[in-house]
Image (cartoon, rainbow, N blue to C red):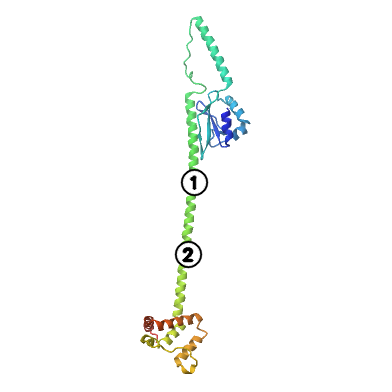
């Protein structure tokens, strides 16, 4: 008995199973694993482990009852060690008394000159339960265990399906974010292209091309044109005056002036660039 008490005291999740001739005791406090008794269940229903074990005889679990020690194993439990066999002192005394009576009776029968043959009628070798009832009880217990396991697996399957749906939703959300980011990038590139194109098609660019067109042939031939404000407007041509007035106009932004300056520098330094720009002016009929 002490081994059983120590087992239940060592872990609140530890349990025991009571079995007598294929008949298991049912725990009224459990719906799942209904044959397992923890210390908490025993204290709640029988006040103490000792009182619970001593009262088994009154529940039909006599000497020879097996107590299986169980400990947690994931969602289920497993048996540890060999089962403990209970022997109740009252059953032992009764058995000894019956053996003594049987011995006295046999001696009496021998003295009277006849031997009593044991009765071999139906059920004479069965204690407490008919074999068919015992088998039915075992099948029922097995069915209950399988049904509990089926319900557990069904719940686990539902959890897996729920996780799968959540992952699909997250995946779809990520795809949407990627598509949105790509759209924003495309719009940004398109806006940049449109901004660049708008300047190339602007009146400022057209005016610049008209002013630069006469000097590009000189740049290609190696002659450096004299474009600039100088010290006085009196010594420059009308075309240069018009270009200076164009640059000074409020319609021309600093960004445009920088762009014009870069064009001019590259026209002077790079003959291939100057030739290409001349080709563009000719292509678009800018003179």
The image quadrant where one finds the C terminus is bottom left
In which quadrant of the rendered view does residue 283 lie? Answer: bottom left
Quarter of the view holding residue 86 = top right
Q: Residues within 10 Å of mark 2 (few under 14, many from 20)?
A: few
| Badge nearest the viewer, 2 or 1 | 2
**Marks 2 and 1 close (CB-CB < 8 Å):** no
- In what element is the residue under mark 1? helix
Count the marks: how many?
2
- Using the image, tell me which numbered label, if any, was put on residue 268: none
101 shown above or below 279: above
Q: Report helix, strand or loop for mark 2.
A: helix
- Is residue 219 positioned above or below 12 on the image? below
Label 1 neighbourhood size at 10 Å, few (<14), some (14-19), many (20+)?
Answer: few
Left or right: residue 56 versus residue 183 is right
Query: Which residue is nearer to you in this view: 235 or 287?
Result: 235
Is residue 178 something that shows in the picture?
Answer: yes
Q: Position of residue 172 (x, y in %)?
A: 47, 57
- Outermost residue toward the right in this view: 47
Horizontal side of residue 28 vs 217, given as left or right: right
Q: Residue furthest top?
A: 112
User: Of the numbered discs in the image, which one, if any, rests on residue 181?
Assistant: 2
- Residue at x 48% of width, y 39% of height: 150
Q: Which quadrant holds residue 201? A: bottom left
Residue at x 42%, y 86% (from the top left corner): 212
Badge 2 or badge 1: first in the primary sequence:
1
| Image coordinates for residue 209, horizontal then vertical, percent | 42, 84
* Position of residue 117 measured from the top left corner of the image (x, y, whole percent): 47, 11
- Residue 202 visible in the picture: no
Separation of marks 2 and 1 at Cα, in angstroms:
35 Å
Label 1: which residue?
158
């Amino acid at each position: 008995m002490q081994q059983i008490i120590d087992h239940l005291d060592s872990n609140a999740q530890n349990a025991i199973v009571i079995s007598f001739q294929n008949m298991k005791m049912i725990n009224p406090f459990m719906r799942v694993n209904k044959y397992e008794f923890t210390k908490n269940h025993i204290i709640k229903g029988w006040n103490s482990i000792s009182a619970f074990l001593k009262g088994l005889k009154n529940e039909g679990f006599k000497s020879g009852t097996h107590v299986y020690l169980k400990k947690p194993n994931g969602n289920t439990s497993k048996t540890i060690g060999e089962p403990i066999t209970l022997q109740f002192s009252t059953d032992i005394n009764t058995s000894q008394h019956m053996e003594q009576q049987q011995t006295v009776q046999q001696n009496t029968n021998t003295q009277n000159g006849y031997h009593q043959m044991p009765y071999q009628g139906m059920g004479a070798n069965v204690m407490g339960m008919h074999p068919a009832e015992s088998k039915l009880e075992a099948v029922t217990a097995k069915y209950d265990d399988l049904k509990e396991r089926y319900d557990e697996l069904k719940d686990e399957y539902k959890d897996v399906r729920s996780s799968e749906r959540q992952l699909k939703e997250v995946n779809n959300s990520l795809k949407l974010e990627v598509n949105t980011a790509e759209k924003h990038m495309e719009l940004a590139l398109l806006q940049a292209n449109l901004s660049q194109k708008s300047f190339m098609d602007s009146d400022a660019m057209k005016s610049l091309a008209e002013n630069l067109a006469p000097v590009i042939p000189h740049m290609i031939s190696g002659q450096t044109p004299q474009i600039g404000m100088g010290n006085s407007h009196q010594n420059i041509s009308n075309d240069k005056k018009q270009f200076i007035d164009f640059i000074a106009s409020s319609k021309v932004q600093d960004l445009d002036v920088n762009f014009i300056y870069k064009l001019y520098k590259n026209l002077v330094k790079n003959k291939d660039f100057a030739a290409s720009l001349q080709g563009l002016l000719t292509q678009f009929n800018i003179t």
